[in-house]
Image (tube, helix red, strand yellow):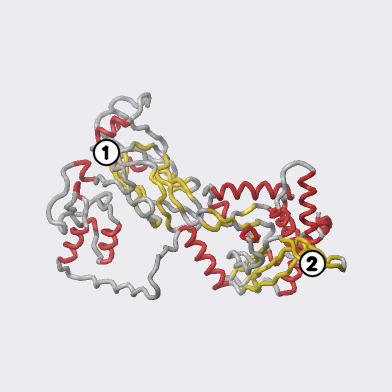
Amino acid sequence: MAQVLEFKLPDLGEGLTEAEIVRWLVAVGDVVAIDQPVVEVETAKAMVEVPCPYGGVVTARFGEEGTELPVGAPLLTVAVGAGEAGAAEGDGAPSGGAGSTGAPSGGASAARPAESSGNVLVGYGTGAPAARRRRVRKDTLQAAVPAAPVRTAPVSAEPVSAAALSGPALSGPAHSGPAISGPVPVVSPLVRKLARQHGLDLRELRGSGRDGLILRSDVEAAIRVPGPEPVAAPAPAPARTGPVGERVPLRGVRGAVADKLSRSRTEIPDATCWVDADATELMAARAAMNAAGGPKISVIALLARICTAALARFPELNSTVDTAAREIVRLPGVNLGFAAQTARGLVVPVVRDAHERDAESLSAEFARLTEVAREGALTPADLTGGTFTLNNYGVFGVDGSTPIINHPEAAMLGVGRIVPKPWVHQGELAVRQVVQLSLTFDHRVCDGGTAGGFLRYVADCVENPVVLLRTV
């Protein structure tokens, strides 16, 4: 007899506690292999495909596309271990032994859950992989598991409970009967929430729906039954005040950005200084480099090269504050983040070891990460570990801004648009390419003199790129 295993949303790492279902990759009734991706989810950092560590037939899916689930919530159930009859041909098990085609012993059935990869997400695992993996033939599993209805609408398919696999559907009063073993036959998040609010154990209920599905009416009937310790109803949610309008949930990337910016403003005593710089020579140097042939050099790559040289002179700004130890941690290398606007919102990819790269290497890496960001394929590793951020908001057609530090970094350099403006050059009024540079810094790591020295050095390099030759 097949055994139904529940696969829960795994720990996605990087401190992430929830994810939104973007697209189901399997339907109820599909046969899945071990480690086959079954759902695409979006976290606050990236879009990832989640592989299932079990092989078998999908019997239920939990959550519609667009639903946000916490880590540990059920994703789907899989019927596995339909007897050793499902072993692939050529397995080599002796007749009558553990690999025979007869009904498995109780010990073999109990050991079946261990026969999975142990992996729940690439890079993260739940344990050691099984010593042996068996491939289960689709026809064998389908014979052992009743065919489940497949719906074409983008909603969770109707679950097939453990009871439906082994016998008739549960019947009787919704609030009586022995506890259910295995996955609880509930598909609606509202039903789960209602039961949780009233302290009900769904495993103690009998569902009146198809295949024992627990409905809202079942939970409401159980709530009306007096118990020895009635649970007080939760306090009503405070009434919303203010103008009536469209409400957009703060979740996913937007929610993560909101949390990080709020934390930055709360924890970091920041200050901002700015200066206008004549970027005419920098633009001329870039044009000369690109005219010489080879890969094109971007403006942001030249600015990044200037930043790494400035951080070598002012390492206080390439640091972080350990509030628990009350220490400033100066970091040995520069992992340079840069703000990128995408369809998913603002993201900050990180160029690793930027201090070891030249302008050509920086330009190539900026282009690669920008393209990956637009495709929504950045990994958590691409978005973490930054030590300093470069924010080119000039692409939005604005001259200046006061950047918010990307917590837990200590500083961010903002760059406005480069535009022709009247400028006094060599004692005469001329039209020059002018840019405004702004530096927001954590006042705990340095004073204004250090921040001003850093910004002045950056401006000097912008105005006269030959200054960089001193640091090569």
Residue 265 % position (x, y): 56, 72
User: In this rendering, is residue 373 above or below 320?
Assistant: above
Residue bearing mark 2? 423
Q: Secondary structure at mark 2?
A: strand
Residue bearing mark 1? 2
Asked whether residue 291 is in view, the answer is yes
Residue 362 % position (x, y): 69, 50
Residue 188 or residue 373, whichever sits in front? 373
**Residue 320 falls left or right of residue 50:** right
Residue 458 % position (x, y): 75, 63
Asked whether residue 389 is in view, the answer is no
Residue 423 or residue 297, whichever sits in front? 423
At x 42%, y 51%, the residue is 10
- Inspect the image, locate mark 2, and give the three-letter code of the amino acid beneath it: Trp
At x 87%, y 68%, the residue is 427
User: In this rendering, is residue 149 above or below 441?
Assistant: above
- Inspect the image, locate mark 1, and give the three-letter code of the amino acid beneath it: Ala
Residue 31 % position (x, y): 34, 36
Q: Secondary structure at mark 1?
A: loop
At x 19%, y 65%, the residue is 223
User: In this rendering, is residue 418 above or below 25?
Assistant: below
Mark identifier at residue 16: none
Q: What is the crowding at mark 2: few (fewer than 14 residues within 10 Å), some, or many (at least 20)?
A: some
Marks 1/2: CA–CA distance: 80 Å
Query: Which quadrant holds the C terminus?
Result: bottom right
Q: What is the crowding at mark 1: few (fewer than 14 residues within 10 Å), some, or many (at least 20)?
A: many
